[in-house]
Amino acid sequence: MSEKKNSLGDLGKWIILATVAGAVCGLLMGESAHSLAPVGDLFMTLIKMVVVPMVFFSLVGGAASLGNSSSAGKIGAVTFAYYGVTTAVAVALGLALSVIFQPGAGINMAAISDAAIDVDMSQSHTIPGFWETVIGFVPVNPFAALVEGNILQTIVFALFVGFGLSVLEPEKKEFMIKIFNYFTEIFIKIMTGIMYLAPIGVFALMADATGTFGYDVLVKLLQLIGLYVVVLIVVTYGMIGGSVALFSKKVSYVQFFKSMWKCQLFAFSTASSMATLPMNMATCENEFGLNKGTVSFALPLGATINMNGNAAYYAMAGCFIAQMYGMELSMSQYIAIIITSTLGAVGQAGVPGPSLLVVAVLVSAGIPIEALPILFGVDRIFDMLRTAVNITGDAACATIVDRFQEQ
């Protein structure tokens, strides 16, 4: 395990170096850097090949696991409700600020993928209504949705399959869940292998982007990071901290953050919720005085499905790239972004390179994915920030549901 972690950590460093090198190369070569674009296009095609089946199998396993936990009673219901509501609010906040401040606006990216823009613009003339949008989430032929790469319909189908699995007889259920988990592992292995090509693909695409649009792309990335930090501050100290102040019986707002800083720092440095889990559990039990059963239930579950920071990032990245292409998103596209970001965050545990799940968000809303590798070089920064927020939400949930343990 340690070798894999070190290997992925080294890969992250290579991606950062490739991003910087690609930006410098693009600035020096100018428009001639476009000759490197096919290399990046090949990398993106490999990602497209894997993302749909990976999302499907991972969500089936995740939904089946959630279904298994339904017998947890009141604590389980409150835990799932808390994680679901806070994630949805984080997505909505990130989406709202992205629409207001337009971090990706000002760069005409249409030259990268004129065909994709043409398709999107043609679809915008027939924007479906509310019920058409809702009905459109349900696949008439789920296998056609898988083949066509319809992410939203694939997610809905996966959830139904997963919850169906959760009510099978124990022997059948365990057998089928193992099969889906094995398929998930297979596609994670494939995606991990593709990610080792990321430095090459990111170098080529970054060189192409900066060669065409100059340093303005880099300025836009800094603007996105700055806006994301604002969103996380509001989510952490407003929504999460506020929920502790309002609903926790044992922990005050000040005490909560006074004790959580070391967990946040560790999560920030490791970018891993699972690695921070032991420290987070010890803090909740020893410093907050929470029931061990509550902590053992809420925190491991949160480390798996509570991804407030991730969900907000997916939505903001989707808006950012749409704005770079000069796209005007419809209400149905915003709904698709919110649903896919929220469900994608729940199903992302164990998937290397969380930014890859932005592909699902972009595809669901009909946004071209060609500009996505621009975000890869700074993904480590986003990952460190969002992980610190995620583990804070886990601890906050534990302090709130602990009150029901005593009743």
Image (tube, helix red, strand yellow):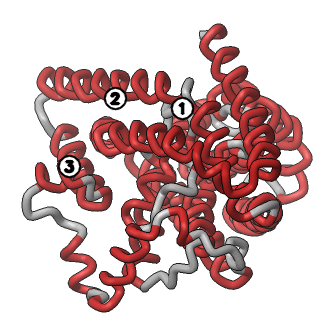
Residue that badge 3 annotates: 146
Residue 2 at x, y = what percent? Answer: 66, 10
The residue under label 1 is 352
Quarter of the image where the N terminus is located: top right
> Residue 207 location, x and y as percent?
69, 47
Q: Which amino acid does label 1 sit on?
A: Pro
Q: Mark 2 points at which residue?
A: 184
Q: Which of marks 3 and 2 is in front?
A: 3
Sequence order check, earlier mark of 2 and 1:
2
Q: Considering only order in the chain, which callout, 1 or 3, is on the residue closer to the N terminus?
A: 3
Q: Which residue occupies 46% across, 77% down?
A: 334
- Above or below 394: residue 323: below
Secondary structure at badge 1 equals loop
Q: Work out how far the residue at label 2 is from the one at label 1, CA to CA, in angstroms.
A: 12 Å
Residue 406 at least partly seen: no
Give the number of marks.
3
User: Distance between the Cα atoms at labels 3 and 2?
Assistant: 15 Å
Mark linked to residue 240: none
When asked about the image quadrant of residue 182, the answer is: top left
Q: How crowded is mark 3: few (under 14 residues within 10 Å), some or many (20 or more)?
A: some
Q: How crowded is mark 2: few (under 14 residues within 10 Å), some or many (20 or more)?
A: many
The answer to whether residue 59 of the structure is visible from this angle is yes
Q: Which of marks 3 and 2 is nearer the N terminus?
A: 3
SS at badge 2: helix
Q: Is mark 3 on a helix, strand or loop?
A: helix
Q: What amino acid is found at the position of numbered circle 2 in the picture?
A: Thr
Is the residue 204 above or below the residue 330 in the image?
above
Residue at image coords 31%, 91%: 125
